[in-house]
Amino acid sequence: MSQLRVRRRLHFMKVFVVGGSCAVGSGVREGIVTTATSAADFERHRGYLTSVAYRMLGTLHDAEDAVQETYLRYLRTTADIHDLRAWLTRTISRICLDEIGSARARRESYVGQWLPEPVVGGFHGLAQPPMGPEDRITLDESVSMAMLVLLESLSPAERTAFILHDTLGLSYDEVSETLGRSHAACRQLVARARAHVRQNSPRFTPDRTQHADAVKAFLAAAARGDIEKLIRVLDPDVTLRSDGGGLVSGVARRPVTGADRVARLLLGVAAKRAATSHAGAVNGSPGLIFEDDTGVVGVMAFSVSGGLITEIDFVVNPEKLRRVDPHR
């Protein structure tokens, strides 16, 4: 159990035993504010905060823990809050910064390759009420499976600074206040992260139609078991990453590269396990969802460049598929 979850449970006991209200200072929240009133203010930002935390932590499970910890800190703060969105962004970023280090330590003992928890159908279903257009962080390259894997190779401070500045558009002054580092140090963090991402980012096309066409061609070839057509839709240097978490047999524990090797491995897996597949949005881009009579058994995300698939991220760890609604 994560430290965030332990703290959350303890604080829930304290809040509701005391009576569900808290004294706060002036500003956005003045006088005695009930838990219900505070919750209403907070809920308007929950979807946005979940999206921010997911980019930083890579799993919805951890992201929702971070959001709840942010809510608990909001309940007990006595600070004057003149811009609630900014205050919540700083708070959840600090929580995530602490959690990234703990999560990285846990992942050192992870069996096989670690991949982010996939988001199928977009972020709009994660919070009630749904986010409006002004609250949504665009599901673009910054939330793709391949990019989230790349962000894992950054230090916690680099990852946080990069997401705050380059993805969320916060100023260096705001990044500095969040991280507790100098303006110059934050510029260096962002510059190092930006250079690393630029050098190692997956090749991809921003053309959604081209991406979808490649996924359709992949699905058609795989469904027919046509290895030649499958190889033709794969880049010669394609990389396949699979995450079974040590819970699914026959899953490659290291990346597999090369069109021929990847095609043969995927067709071999398909022959051993009967499952139906259909296209759906995976982390904001066209991907595939696999089901059998037990439910969702796999989610596949793709990077596409020049009409060819350059990277495949295949999540089959059942613990990461519990939240997947295949029909969203």
Image: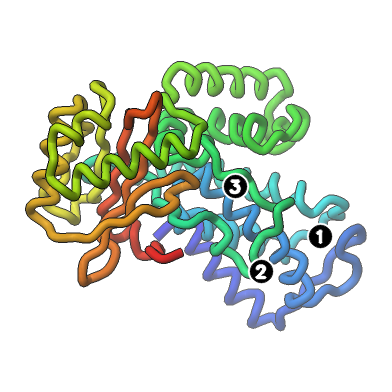
Residue 110 appears in the picture as rendered: no
The residue at which mark 2 appears reads as 129
Q: What residue type is labelled 2?
A: Pro
Q: Quadrant of residue 298?
A: bottom left
Mark 2: give few (<14), some (14-19) or many (20+) Cα within 10 Å.
Answer: few
* SS class, disc 1: loop
- Res. 16 in view: yes
Real-space CA distance between mark 2 and mark 3, rounded to the nearest whole angstrom? 17 Å
Q: How crowded is mark 3: few (under 14 residues within 10 Å), some or many (20 or more)?
A: many
Q: Position of residue 162 (x, y in %)?
A: 59, 30
Instruction: Looking at the image, tell me whether mark 2 or mark 3 is earlier in sequence order.
Output: 3
Which mark is on residue 52?
3
Placement of 280 over or under 90, stated as above or below: below
Look at 25% across and 22% down and name the residue there.
Answer: 237
CA distance separating discs 3 and 1:
24 Å
Q: Position of residue 209 (x, y in %)?
A: 47, 39
Q: Which of marks 3 and 1 is in front?
A: 3
Question: Closer to the camera, 216 or 162?
Answer: 216
Q: Which of 260 and 141 is in front in this view?
A: 260
Residue underneath mark 1: 78
